[in-house]
Amino acid sequence: MRKASPAALFVLLGIVACTTTPKPPAQMPPGVDATADAGVDASSDETATAAEAPDEDEAADAGSEAPTPRACPDHMALVDDGQKRFCIDQWEASLVETVADGSEQPYPHYLPVDGHVVRAVSEPGVFPQGFISEVQAQDACAASGKRLCAYDEWKTACMGPAKTTFPYGDARRPGTCHDTGKSAVGAVFGTKALAASPAPAAPAKNSRAPSPASRAAHVTSGRAAQTSHARATPSKKASTAKGAARTTSKPPTGKASTPKKPPRRPAKASTRPASVDPSVWTRLNDPALGQVEGALAQTGDHAECRNAFDVYDMVGNLHEWVATDASLPHGTFAGGYYLDTTINGDGCRYRTVAHAHEYHDYSTGFRCCATPRDP
């Protein structure tokens, strides 16, 4: 066998070295990529990428701080206009019922709550609870560690940071909020029932004329009856809505985010107010009224009926009870419902004070407020 010359050996060893061991970066000329010089595709070098990538958990621990607790519980919005600061349900309240085994299940929105153990929740995409009185709404909020909103809180939340007549602005846009629904009374009882109902007082100038269906709702004769039941958190003195807010501003549990367990007592029975005709009371609380397709809308269905506080449906859909002093002969609900948002004021200024604290019908709903955590 012929011996290789020293020069040939040197060349051969150099070729082997170049194909097995890439030069270290320190030996490469300035500006040249060592990986590219070695014939390796950097994007496909999974081993190198894995070795160089920091551990995700370590990176999170090193570069992040503990999240700041939210000021309000889930599905509540923070309202802060510089004068008032509170939490309010983003959507009109629905109910869950505690059953015999201690579990909870959704409560039918079209049934009165007398005798049932319920608490308030705020959820999108559900039918809100009608057929509820101020007294019962107060208890349902308290059972979730919240409270019924005072009227001045409710109005502040409805008008938004810009303080507009409607959640979306000052000019009415019919159909933006749910203010054009089908008449449930007409659908269930027919046009004769509508025609037999007395007309309300004349609406304010430039407001929309009342529809026949709106004349059928909330019919009373004379002064509203005095309630005979104490409320969950009664005021000790008669005052304005501002006073009512002071008496209920303290959070029920000290932690707005931790709901109380539902009370083990059923909702108070609603006695028909003396000023309401028995037949009217029976008809306006017929469960069929809450199930008419095209009447009541689900929460959040009208996506533009919201404001910069991110609160929905405060005009139309259901009247919303607010907290009033128990010593007064009447309660207050606000916002109008799906057939009337003008007769007793326009948009966020709509307010009805014609009914006792125990009154309810298919159009009366509510939402809750709470005191936010300290910043």
Image (cartoon, helix red, strand yellow):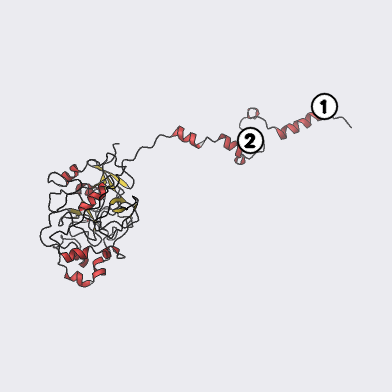
Q: Residue furthest bottom?
A: 192
Quarter where residue 244 is shown: top left
Query: Residue at image x 63%, y 35%?
Result: 35
Q: Secondary structure at mark 1?
A: helix
Quadrant of the image containing the C terminus: top left
Q: Secondary structure at mark 2?
A: helix
| Residue, disc 1 | 6
The mark nearer the N terminus, 1 or 2, is 1
30 lies above or below 229: above
Quarter where residue 300 is shown: bottom left
* Image location (x, y in percent) of residue 106: 33, 55
Query: Residue at image x 66%, y 35%?
Result: 37
Q: Disc 1 residue type?
A: Pro
Please state which of residues 151 and 203 is positioned toward the viewer in this rendering. Answer: 151
Q: Residue furthest right?
A: 1
| Residue, disc 2 | 35
Q: Residue furthest front?
A: 100
Residue 159 appearing in the image: no
Q: How many marks?
A: 2
Please state which of residues 143 and 243 is positioned toward the viewer in this rendering. Answer: 143
* Image location (x, y in percent) of residue 28: 65, 30
Quadrant of the image containing the N terminus: top right
* Image location (x, y in percent) of residue 337: 24, 59
In this rendering, position of residue 51 left or right of residue 153: right
Residue 141 appearing in the image: yes
Query: Residue at image x 52%, y 35%?
Result: 55
Q: Disc 2 residue type?
A: Thr
Residue at mark 1 to residue at mark 2: CA–CA distance: 31 Å
